Amino acid sequence: MKELICIVCPKGCHLKIDEENGFAVTGNACEKGPVYAVKELTNPTRVVTSTVRIQGAEIPRMPVKTDGDIPKDKIFAAMQLLNGVTLQAPVRVGTVIVPNILGTGKNFVATRSLGKIE
Amino acid sequence: MGCTILSKSLPAPEYAERFIDEIEKSNVTVLTGAMVLDVLPDKSVLAIHPQHGYMQLQGAAVVLAMGCRERTRGAIGIPGSRPAGVFTAGAAQLYMNIEGYQVGKRAVILGSGDIGLIMARRMTLEGAKVLGVYELMPYSGGLARNIVQCLDDYDIPLHLSHTITEIRGDKRVEQVVVQKVDENRTPIAGTEEVIDCDTVLLSVGLIPENELSRHAGIAIDPRTSGPAVYENMETSIPGIFACGNVAHVHDLVDFVTAESQRAGKAAAVYCQTGSPSSQSATQLQAGNGIGYTVPQKIRPDRVEKSVEVFFRVNQVFKNVQIEVRSGDALIAKFKREHMAPGEMEKITLPAVLLNKINSQTATIAIAKEGAK
């Protein structure tokens, strides 16, 4: 029996997973719990948020996120990809900043619109 | 992160942008860069603005949404020298996420509030070493999911029942002394540990920002440090409403949004119809295990279908029953497997049950018996 706290939503369900019986999950309030639990015990993934440099906008950083979850062991390597990036305003929310992160098929995208300052 | 309102998990800037876009499409006048100096009981608002100068606005209704501020080093009185490198977690978040500065390289975090936990992850991802999170209480002040995804994921230790008893350093933080505390939160002699670090982040609580409310003469609930509100978020002054962190500190933006929509709708109704004087209000009392409730007062005749009551427990509970009682009568009961002070709870009371309350008060409490 493994115990996990579900992180899919802020409710934070206390999950119990029976690894010997086909990863049977109890303690979940919704259908996302078992999906998370199995993934967490076999191939844990996370959405990563960070920022990149932007020029010509009212603030010097553009917030970004991965547009899906990426393997946990690739998080630091993914962060490295952002270090060399400098955007030029304007940039719209949802714009792809770094495509296909480390071959995962997931992209870093902008999570805010920043206009150009005259 | 917001989740339920837009049925999608969004980072804060993206969540905010949805609502900014919505208001820009509306005919609502928005004055950014303005500062409100005073709100008067007659619902006039005195403000200053970079272009308009001094402004006197007369509201038919006013919604207070000033949010909250962070408790500081001064508020908790950490002894020691006063070097640079001591930040509230939110200030560090601003420097890092908006202004693009690395706030430090070796950090100790005092307090386990959500912003502190999130900053532990942010600093780690940006190349800093977060040495540990030290929490005075025997339980975390933040959400369980943030312990998992911000601390456990990066092997950052959480030390419960610990505090910082000294900050050392000349120009910049050089060391902190941490100590274990006993059940009365008093540091235990002999448990001192010296940690070399250059940064201390404080995540030790949030205080609703109610200077304007107090000056307007609005009744403040000492338990929430926010205005005591009715079921529609109306304060003790008819036509002045409060919502979000100014009323009580939330964990989740979705609840702030829902509460704000309720306050906004009630303010619009008030503008059209005024506040019909209500015959009676039921005072909600926080019983065993409950820190506070919002709303504090319910006018049953003003509840359409149901009212959501938010509260926090004052200790960790497992497998308990929440009971709503009026006099000797049990009005409603709710089961919970797990509750913690860091996680706001809510129950929904349908109008039919509220009408069963025939006394001036109702008490929400954790049942003492029945716990497994």
Image: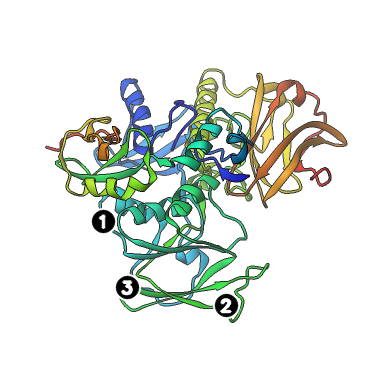
Q: Nearer the viewer, residue B348 or B206?
A: B348
Q: Name the residue rendered at 60%, 47% in the picture.
A: B224
Which chain is disc 1 placed on? B
Per the image, label 1 sits on a secondary structure element best described as loop
> In screen coordinates, is A8 left or right of B312?
left
**Percent from the top left, x then y, of residue B323?**
77, 37
Q: Nearer the viewer, residue A73 or B31?
A: A73
> In screen coordinates, is A86 left or right of B223?
left
Residue B43 in view in this figure: no
Residue B82 in view in this figure: yes
Q: Which mark is residue B172?
A: 3
Residue matched to label 2: B191
> In screen coordinates, is B372 left or right of B64?
right
Amino acid carrying mark 2 in the image: Thr
Residue matched to label 1: B101
Per the image, label 2 sits on a secondary structure element best described as loop
Same subunit, labels 3 and 2: the answer reads yes
Residue B55 quadrant: top left
Residue B276 quadrant: top right
Mark 3 crowd level (few <14, some 14–19, many ≥20, 10 Å Cα):
some
